[in-house]
Amino acid sequence: MSITNRTAPIRSGPTRSTPSQAHRFLEVRALTDALSADLSAEDQTPQSMTDASPAKWHRAHVTWFFEEFILRNVESYRVYDDTYRYLFNSYYEAVGARHPRPERGLVTRPGVADVGHYREYVDNAMVDALERGVLGDDALALLELGCNHEQQHQELLLMDIKHLFSTHAFGPVYVDRAVDDPGDPDPLTWRSVTGGVTEVGATQGASGFTYDNEGPRHRVYLEDFEIAERAVTNAEWLEFMADDGYRRPEFWLSEGWAHITQNGWQAPEYWAQTDGEWTTFTLSGRRRLVGDEPVMHVSFYEADAYARWAGARLPTEFEWEAAADTGDIARGQLLDPQRCHPGRAGATMIGDVWEWTASAYLPYPGFVPANGAVGEYNGKFMCDQHVLRGASAVTPPGHERATYRNFFPASARWAFSGLRLAR
């Protein structure tokens, strides 16, 4: 399960609509439009792999969310096109039949212009409903949920277009930016964290939006541990590779070894060696590696193997949260549409790259999915997934927090995923 469709919130819910809610809605919608503005119709239609979705589909799906869960319950609303309920439903079994996920790239109609008209139609209807004050508390809570859902898809859109562009023989550029200067990482330092009984997770009814899988807040017991002050870097990963890290089974989980052997992995996703120099594909095209940037596009298997090679381990998600729970957490690189790439690895725990943890994605004690279709997407995916914490260079600002639980299968690499060591 990718970060899409994490759709059941912990919420207290607003009591009435306000102008700020309409502004918030339009601001989120405008960012999606901006991120896709320079993508051609041809860019927005293909699907480069089963886990990815076309940019056009992302734009339509997040629009469908508002129509399906809010506007269909407004008496005066007229559905834009009944076929869209089938085409742009993602995983909501309670809603009905849906187009097969692996075939989203075959949906040539509606076209990009039609999807733009659909977005405009729904935007106008949503603003009208807000201005007329016809949305109740539940609908207003779904509005905030829908905005967060769209922010997730903004990140997914960039992940997916990066994967698509990487398959092109000539490496298209999504955002043109200056080449980063090469650099060497600062020495790795460690921070001691005192163990004991500690509370983790989001508090029910607290201010600010959280997803249901972030709570209930509960107690865990931690042993004393140390955590690295920064993420693992490209330069350090090159050392792992130079020491035959990808060819030494003693570092690998059995399933991970079988996976890299079967798929021929010898480096992170998007890396290539040309004329003796390592490069990586970015949203600004293929670039030489920058040594002090966080390594990214590695799977859980690779992250775990590196940690063993380094004489350390991955932190559990509870250790990660305890280490991050220090009040005002410094942010690394979040989404800047003019960059879409991590900065240099520094003493931050949120931003640049999502960080794999050692924890399987499981429910917290007392977790209960929300009622209805929007409750489908957390609990049902708590199987064969691993938790990542933090945020990435394509996470929209304001969508990040210390309790956020991202999750992917152990083999996933197209996310902006890296790692931090613990011991």
Image: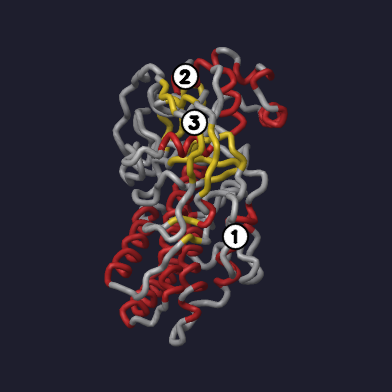
Residue 65 image offset from top left, x and y in percent: 49, 67
Q: Residue furthest bottom?
A: 76
Q: Does dot 1 land on a helix, a strand or a loop? A: loop
Q: Residue furthest top?
A: 243
Instruction: Give the residue type that dot 1 points to.
Output: Val
Q: Quadrant of residue 293?
A: top left
Is 251 above or below relative to 270? above
**Left or right: 192 in relation to 219:** left
Q: Which residue is mark 1?
A: 368
Image depth: mark 2 or mark 3 in front: 3
Residue 173 image offset from top left, x and y in percent: 39, 41
**Left or right: 83 in relation to 277:** right
Residue 63 image offset from top left, x and y in percent: 46, 67
Instruction: Give the residue type that dot 3 points to.
Output: Gly
Which residue is at a point 41% across and 71% down the rendered structure image? 140
Q: Which residue is mark 2?
A: 236
Residues at marks 2 and 1, CA–CA distance in whole angstroms:
41 Å
Q: Does dot 3 land on a helix, a strand or a loop? A: loop
Badge 1 local density, few (<14 within 10 Å), some, or many (20+)? some
Q: Which residue is mark 3?
A: 195
Image depth: mark 1 or mark 3 in front: 3
Q: Residue furthest front?
A: 197
Residue 32 image offset from top left, x and y in percent: 38, 57
